[in-house]
Image: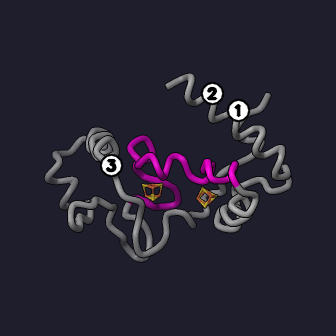
Amino acid sequence: MDTVDKIFSCTRCGYCCHGETTVSLDDNDQKRMIEVLAEDRAVVEEKYWRITRGIVQMKIIDGHCIFFDNGCKVHGGRPWRCAEWPLHPSILLDENNFYTIADSCPGIKVDVGYQEFCRILKLLMAKAKISC
Ligand code: SF4
Ligand code: SF4
């Protein structure tokens, strides 16, 4: 069966949760995170978010997202861009994107080969659309 573990298995290295900024949260991300944290919006904003000119991101602590601690501490409420990573659709467009993303994410199974990787990724994306 063509399951995600054939092309990706997270090593929990945390690379994607490190840096000086995080992904931004759209309205749905914000609602979901508030629900999962089960706190008032004002509290979530104060404790976890950095809001700059209306753009909501997560706070950075010691060079990583505030929710990173040997894994994501808000997994069910993480922003969609976090959930999508590293199986980004741009991989399907250009083999260079595949290797660039693989360079940033040791969980990508490069040995599968680009063509096979894309075949499975397309199937997974189609399944995800059907189940939405
Ligand atoms: S960079 Fe890849 S392997 Fe590392 S934590 Fe992020 S998704 Fe997992
Ligand atoms: S929300 Fe979770 S997955 Fe996204 S950057 Fe923060 S710790 Fe990483």
Dot 1 crowding, Cα within 10 Å, few <14, some 14–19, many 20+: some
Please determine whether, in this image, residue 78 is positioned above or below residue 95. Answer: above
Left or right of 122 in this view: 52: left
Report the residue at 68% width, 66% height from top.
100
Asked if the residues shown at circle 1 and circle 2 are in contact, with their CB atoms under 8 angstroms apart, the answer is yes
**Residue identifier under label 1:** 123
As drawn, the residue found furthest toward the top would be 130
**Residue identifier under label 3:** 26
Secondary structure category for the residue under label 2 = helix
Instruction: Give the amino acid at mark 1.
Output: Leu
Expressed as whole percent of the image width and height from the top left, the position of residue 61 reads 36, 72
Dot 2 crowding, Cα within 10 Å, few <14, some 14–19, many 20+: few
Please determine whether, in this image, residue 96 is positioned above or below residue 39. Answer: below
Report the residue at 49% width, 69% height from top.
18
Report, in whole angstroms, how far the alpha carbon at label 1 lies from the one at label 3. Answer: 27 Å
Secondary structure category for the residue under label 1 = helix
Secondary structure category for the residue under label 3 = loop
Ligand 1 quadrant assignment: bottom right
Compare marks 1 and 3 and give the one earlier in the sequence.
3
Q: Nearer the viewer, residue 127 or 75?
A: 127
Instruction: Give the amino acid at mark 2.
Output: Lys
Magenta part of the chain:
67-93
Report the residue at 77% width, 32% height from top.
2
| Quadrant in the picture for residue 52 | bottom left
